[in-house]
Image (cartoon, helix red, strand yellow):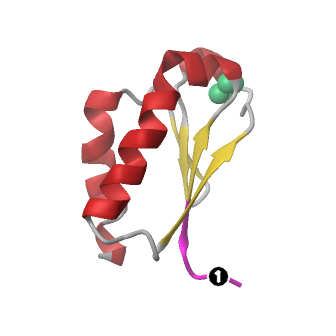
Amino acid sequence: MSNKLEMQVCLGSSCFSRGNKEMVLFIKEYLRKNHLEDKVLFKGARCLDLCSSGPNLVINGKIIQGVSLSMVEKILDQELEDIR
Ligand code: FES
């Protein structure tokens, strides 16, 4: 079993069109800048059936809803604090 933190961005059509496309690029860059690429398993997810509250992000099983690009950095700072 991997002890990496698992992070998923919903890439269902609703979340994708609401901003998760840009979110993927932002998160990849964030992980690179913070040297966290080896500690985080980052992948896309299929629709989580929570489209109306998207864009959605899942970090270690915790669903974070309504994530905008302007708030994602703060969320990552908080959620990834323990693995730095
Ligand atoms: S597309 Fe993301 S929850 Fe449906």
- Taking the image in four quarters, ligand 1 sits in the one at top right
Measuring from the top left, give residue 51's x and y in whole percent. Answer: 65, 20
Q: Which residues are magenta?
A: 1-6
Residue 81 among those drawn in magenta: no
Q: Residue at x 28, y 34 (%)?
A: 71
Residue nearest the observer in this picture, 8 or 50: 8
Q: How many marks?
A: 1
Measuring from the top left, give residue 49's x and y in whole percent. Answer: 74, 27
Instruction: Name the quadrant of the C terminus.
Output: bottom left
Residue designated by label 1: 2
Q: Residue at x 37, y 70 (%)?
A: 36
Measuring from the top left, give residue 23's x and y in whole percent. Answer: 43, 35
Q: In the image, 46: left or right of 79? A: right
Q: In the image, 2: left or right of 37? A: right
Amino acid type shown at disc 1:
Ser
**In terms of image quadrants, where is residue 30?**
bottom left
Measuring from the top left, give residue 78's x and y in whole percent. Answer: 29, 56
Q: Residue at x 55, y 20 (%)?
A: 53
Label 1: element kind: loop
Q: Main secondary structure of the magenta part?
A: loop
Q: Is residue 8 above or below residue 64?
A: below
Q: Is residue 27 above or below residue 19?
A: below
Q: Is residue 65 above or below residue 14?
A: below
Q: Residue at x 37, y 26 (%)?
A: 68
Instruction: Name the quadrant of the N terminus.
Output: bottom right
